[in-house]
Amino acid sequence: MKRPPVIVVVGHVDHGKTTLLDYIRKANVASREVGGITQSIGAYEVVHPSTSSGNNERMTFIDTPGHEAFSKMRRRGANIADLAILVVAATDGVQQQTKEAIKMLQETETPFVVAINKIDSAGADEQKVKNELMQAQVFLEGFGGNTSWQAISAKTGKGVSELLDLLLLAADLEELTYDPAAVASGYVLEGKRDGKKGIVATVILKDGTLKVGDMIQTGTVSGKIKILENFLGERVDELTPSSPARVLGFEALPTVGAEFHAAKALEAIMRVIAKAPERVVKQRLAEGEAELNLILKADVSGSLEALSGIMKSLPHPPELRVAVISESVGDITDGDVKDAIGHHATIIGFRTQATKAAEELARAQRIDIVQSEIVYDLVKAIEERLKIKAREKSLGILEILAVFGRKGKAQIIGGKVTEGEIKNNAELEVTRGEVLLGSGKIINLQHQRVDAPVVVAGKECGLLFDAEIEVKVGDRLVMR
Ligand code: GDP
């Protein structure tokens, strides 16, 4: 069945995003008798009489301010918005955040309509905006491109109805549909703890039918829908896409941007999740390179939540960034290990087991898995790794590529300096994976078979290394 579009408004600060969202809401929200406009829950629905179809069409607008929430979600792969309005003030033109928004829309392939705003203003210069948009690679309809646009005043409402028409046309091109009988799914827009009500989450439904009494689950938290409200705060028994919904009944705070699934029986949800483990179970919580990447696994959502909280608030040296790459409930699988390989991450298992395949892969790829039934032990283990990382920071690191044998007490090793520099006669620590094994001393250092006082990053070297520990290929020697 046809599904109404979910629309987000993006653009530079002060260009009129909030004003536009307010205008659209005031002018189009259907049941105005329900105490006027209720408090915003992060999204609202409007009904707009389409000039092309003649029908009253539904549309959902996300009114979380700015594009921050949206881009955060997009980075996590959440397809929460189907369309966007790019607002550009005619008084101000294309600005920094306009460009950022354009980049994000293009990267995420989100169809958008341009709203040239504030045309009621004395300083409005529509033509200038069009030229600047062209320079920013946005080619407008009628000017050699096919991006729809509309001159508007969010203040007076001029052009806004036409803008909504354009959005409906853009939505038609997307052929948005849903299956009323499918397991319900969508995205978490907001979540908060309410003193009286418990956890209150706003979600946007994108498939299926959401019903009171359904079991509901994100990658990290679960619950049962005790109360379902529409965006006006009215209690309802069920909702269909693309409605915003207020859900009471999550056991813990769900992550913003998380995908959820809901159905009468948990088994039905699990079947869907099992089919899409990449999308659902592993919600990415942090982006970018960090010194210590963690993948968290726990037996139940409650303990996962606790573990996550502790790991994120671990004290660590300021120059070290710790990032939780993903967190999910269940055993440690080879999929988790593959993720860890991709991110050079450490897997932390709290009251979980690792599957045989996971263990084997981890061993082969030297992925560090730390498991315990006791949080304190996990914290200790991570602190230990952070210490190693901190030491690594300022130093030289040598990766061992070959162990040739012994000469007296010393081991003959070949390796490559991967960071900083390594000096002859230096004391080096031996680390395997993330574990510190001990230390030793270089008694001879050679580069291209010639004695060298120092070997720098990128260069290979041979060395005589005096240490109690037997070093192995893949170990790292770290200079303080
Ligand atoms: P946002 O930061 O993009 O959400 O921008 P706002 O909606 O808060 O608008 C910033 C300022 O521009 C406010 O003072 C609005 O009253 C004003 N504004 C927004 N739209 C219009 C418009 O169409 N015409 C005029 N004259 N002012 C507008």
Image (spheres, rainbow, N blue to C red):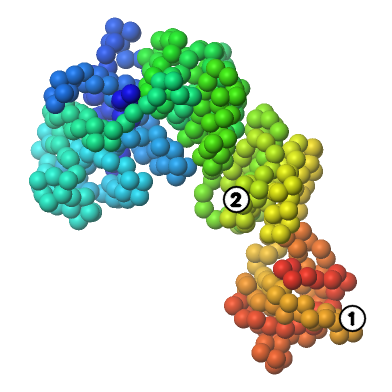
Q: Are marks 1 and 2 in contact (CB under 8 Å)?
A: no
Query: In this figure, which residue is indicated by the disc labeled 1?
Result: 409
Q: Which mark is residue 274?
A: none
- For the residue labelled by badge 1, is the local secondary structure a helix, a strand or a loop? loop
Amino acid beneath label 2: Asp
> Which percent across, then down, holds residue 288?
52, 53
Q: Residues within 10 Å of mark 2 (few under 14, many from 20)?
A: some
Q: Tell me which corner region of the image, top left, top right, bottom left or bottom right, holds residue 91.
A: top left
Name which residue type carries label 1: Lys
Mark 1 CB near ligand 1 (8 Å cut): no
Residue depicted at 85% across the width and 69% down the height = 469
In this rendering, is residue 300 above or below 367?
A: above
Residue at 74% x, 50% y: name it. Answer: 359
* Outermost residue to the bottom: 450
Quadrant (top left, top right, bottom left, bottom right) of the N terminus: top left
Q: Which mark is residue 339?
A: 2
Residue 211 x, y percent position in the rendering: 48, 15
Asked whether the viewer can see residue 333, the reply is yes
Q: Which residue is painted at 40% across and 28% down in the image?
A: 206
> In this rendering, would 125 be left or right of 99?
left
Neighbor class of circle 1 (other Cα within 10 Å; few <14, some 14-19, many 20+) is few
Q: Secondary structure at mark 2?
A: helix
The quadrant holding residue 207 is top left
- The answer to whether 106 appears left or right of 92 in the picture is right
Instruction: Work out whether residue 237 or residue 459 is closer to the camera in this orientation and state it.
Output: 237
